[in-house]
Amino acid sequence: MKFARFIHNGNTRTGVKTENGIHLITGDMLTNWEYTDEVVQEEEVEWLAPVTPGKVIGIGANYVKSKEELPEEIPELPVFFFKPSSSVIGPEADIQIPDVIDEVKFESELAVIIGKEMKDVAKENVLDYVFGYTIGNDVTAPQFFHDDGHWTVGKSFDTFTPLGPFVETELDPAQIRVKAEINGEEKQNSPTSLMIVPLAEMVSYLSKVMTLQPGDCILTGSPLGAYMIKANDIVECKIDEIGTLKNKTVKTPVSLST
């Protein structure tokens, strides 16, 4: 099933994509919901991010170019980072580039949406706690990375985490490809089998560090091919089984004086 959040007639609603349109639902899509009698068409809605995560967690440098480059053992201490919930936007919303820099980096990713509280879960049981999957764009301003390796500011600007358009609940994350196009030209196209830290191991590790809550979003890394983009570029992050997350970059005034 494909769940979505959107604005319709001035109200924020949730629905399920069907052959006839978007079937509206009531309740919490993560826990307890039911269909209404209303169906709307996609052209009638303004898309929002499909979830409002309490936590967004990303992993760094998690893809290789080919299976031959995969390490025999996964890292004992993977590189994780937080992105604030205030950085989340939906499809078609603008990615704002602070006017103190000229470009940012796009990173198309498979995003995991947690469905129920999980703590200290073995990798074999991780999928029992996953609600579904969406597409994420881990927008980054490496110009704001600290010399000592701290990434927080460069990952945290408002609009730096587009998510959507749907949360797909019927998906085998091991059998998909993560893609991206910039202004219609393909830049990324890799299978998730090229992840250095596989999805189940990644989520299990995080659950041993912190309690993961329903709606939390885990970005699983971006394939090779991500690079810097400028204002007015069109970014389309794609996973065929989910859809296309499309956003445009724009310049915006930002004062960072201290």
Image (cartoon, rainbow, N blue to C red):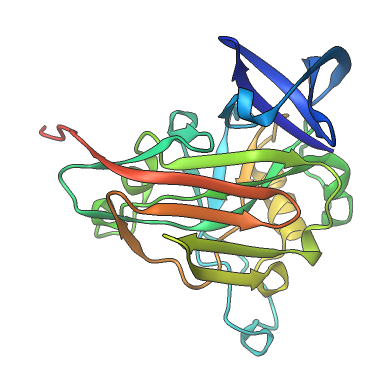
Residue at coordinates 48% horizontally, 58% vertically from top-left? 107
Position of residue 61 measured from the top left corner of the image (x, y, whole percent): 51, 67
Position of residue 21 measured from the top left corner of the image (x, y, whole percent): 78, 30
- Front-lying residue, 69 or 136: 136
Image check: 215 left or right of 230?
right
Position of residue 119 measured from the top left corner of the image (x, y, whole percent): 76, 38
Image check: 255 left or right of 3?
left
Residue at coordinates 60% horizontally, 26% vertically from top-left? 52
The reply to whether residue 116 is in sight is no
The answer to which quarter of the image holds residue 56 is top right
Q: Is residue 44 above or below residue 222?
A: above
The answer to which quarter of the image holds residue 241 is bottom right
**Residue lying farthest bottom?**
68
Residue at coordinates 71% horizontally, 44% vertically from top-left? 207
Q: Quadrant of the C terminus?
A: top left
The answer to which quarter of the image holds residue 254 is top left
The reply to whether residue 1 is in sight is yes
Q: Quadrant of the N terminus?
A: top right
Residue at coordinates 53% horizontally, 57% vertically from top-left? 108
- Front-lying residue, 208 or 14: 14
Position of residue 55 measured from the top left corner of the image (x, y, whole percent): 57, 34
- Front-lying residue, 131 or 198: 131
How many numbered discs sit on the rendered protein? 0
Image check: 170 left or right of 57?
right
